[in-house]
């Protein structure tokens, strides 16, 4: 009988250097899309998928991230005193129950595989999810929830996948597809950041995973791969070598790479326009801006 996926690892130890100087004092995961930090989108997605235990792999300087999920009695008291019940309701989503959240330190930046390995003792012998908060996905049904529902029929390992232009494949792990079944693909291999000539397909892995504890055993070997780092992709590929199943899942939704400035700006526009109370004013501003730029030309 397949066990339910109730634990998720959030690798958040990165320094966010692409967003300096902002990330000199603010963890990248606290940067906001409209009025919610990136990490809140990841947590909400995990909750919708049935995740009950949240494991953060952090590093020095992430104190604001930890504080974000704590209660704020002074703020709550002031809001209650002023009758701002709607804001109090919003704050509820930012609070985590005692014991539901844990923090592990990654002392050296040795790659995503190493970050996941750091949480191994809290996973034990259970399947688990990995969510990269940089990848924000706008979807009617949250991406991880889609994957968990598919996983109930497949077991094994599962990675979220999307089609990318061939010239961009070198920025991703890419699936070697064995059988294409529509939303699901079975795989015969995975290649981390291949050149355009070496990419086995244009189906790229993005930051959502459902993994078996066997992946952690592979990571125990601490073998380095692309970039001299311990790659999670390599550990998943080892599952295939051992004769175990690895599936790619074509999720329904739009992914934004909020680890890049351009992706972050695109997500800000998309999520701003999706808000009823902001849409009309925002669209009006964008129309005026486009008109001004055309006139200037």
Image (spheres, helix red, strand yellow):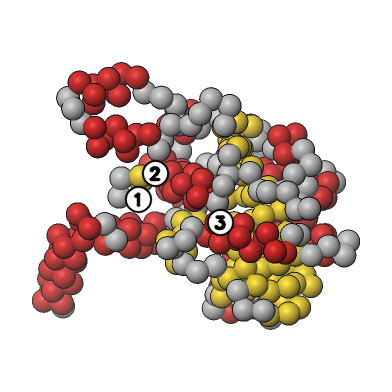
> Please, what secondary structure does the residue beneath circle 3 have?
helix
Which residue is more in the foreground, 154 or 139?
154
Residue 110: x and y in percent read 69, 44
Taking the image as drawn, is residue 153 in sight?
A: yes
Q: Label 2: few (<14), some or many (≥20) within 10 Å?
A: some
Give the CA distance from mark 1 to mark 3.
Answer: 20 Å
In terms of image quadrants, where is residue 124?
top right
The number of numbered discs placed on residues in the rendered structure image is: 3
Please say if the residues under marks 2 and 1 sit with CB atoms less than 8 Å apart. yes
Tell me the CA gap for discs 2 and 1: 6 Å
List the residue tagged with mark 1: 33
x%, y% of residue 245?
A: 79, 65
Which mark lies nearer to you, 1 or 3?
A: 3
- Judge whether 169 appears above or below 153 on screen: below
Q: Is residue 257 visible?
A: no
How many other residues sit within 10 Å of disc 1, few (<14), some (14-19) or many (≥20)? many
Work out whether residue 108 or residue 92 is closer to the camera in this orientation and state it: 92
Query: Nearer the observer, disc 2 or disc 3?
Result: 3
Residue 36 coordinates in the image, percent (x, y): 35, 44
Q: Residue furthest front?
A: 1
Instruction: Classify the position of the C terminus by image quarter.
Output: bottom left
Q: Secondary structure at mark 2?
A: strand
**Which residue sits at x=66%, y=68%?**
248
Nearer-N-terminus badge (1/3):
1
- Residue to which mark 2 is pinned: 37
Q: Could you say where residue 235 lies in the image, as x and y percent from the top left?
A: 78, 55
Query: What residue is pinned by disc 3?
Result: 144
- Position of 55 with respect to 88 (left or right) is right
> Is there CB contact under 8 Å for labels 1 and 3?
no
Label 2 vs 3, first from the N-terminus = 2
- Near-viewer residue (284 or 70): 70
């Amino acid at each position: 009988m397949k066990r339910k996926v109730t634990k998720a690892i959030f690798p958040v130890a990165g320094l966010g250097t692409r967003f300096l100087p902002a990330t000199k004092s603010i963890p990248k995961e606290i940067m906001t899309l409209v009025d919610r930090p990136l990490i809140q989108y990841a947590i909400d997605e995990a909750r919708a998928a049935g995740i009950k235990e949240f494991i953060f792999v952090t590093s020095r300087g992430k104190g604001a991230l930890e504080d974000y999920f704590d209660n704020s009695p002074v703020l709550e008291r002031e809001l209650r005193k002023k009758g701002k019940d709607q804001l109090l309701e919003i704050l509820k989503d930012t609070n985590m129950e005692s014991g539901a959240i844990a923090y592990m330190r990654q002392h050296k930046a040795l790659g995503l595989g190493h970050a996941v390995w750091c949480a191994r003792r809290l996973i034990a012998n259970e399947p688990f999810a990995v969510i990269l908060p940089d990848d924000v996905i706008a979807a009617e049904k949250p991406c991880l929830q889609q994957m968990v529902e598919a996983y109930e029929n497949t077991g094994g390992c599962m990675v979220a996948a999307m089609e990318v232009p061939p010239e961009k494949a070198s920025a991703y792990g890419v699936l070697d597809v064995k059988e294409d079944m529509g939303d699901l693909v079975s795989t015969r291999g995975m290649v981390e950041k291949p050149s355009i000539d070496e990419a086995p397909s244009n189906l790229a892995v993005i930051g959502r995973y459902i993994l078996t504890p066997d992946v952690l055993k592979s990571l125990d070997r601490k073998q380095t791969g692309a970039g001299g780092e311990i790659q999670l992709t390599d550990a998943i590929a080892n599952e295939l070598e051992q004769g175990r199943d690895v599936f790619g899942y074509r999720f329904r939704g739009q992914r934004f790479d909020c680890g890049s400035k351009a992706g972050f700006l695109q997500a800000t526009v998309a999520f701003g326009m999706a808000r009823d109370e902001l849409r009309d004013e925002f669209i009006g501003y964008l129309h005026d801006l486009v008109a001004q730029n055309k006139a200037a030309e």
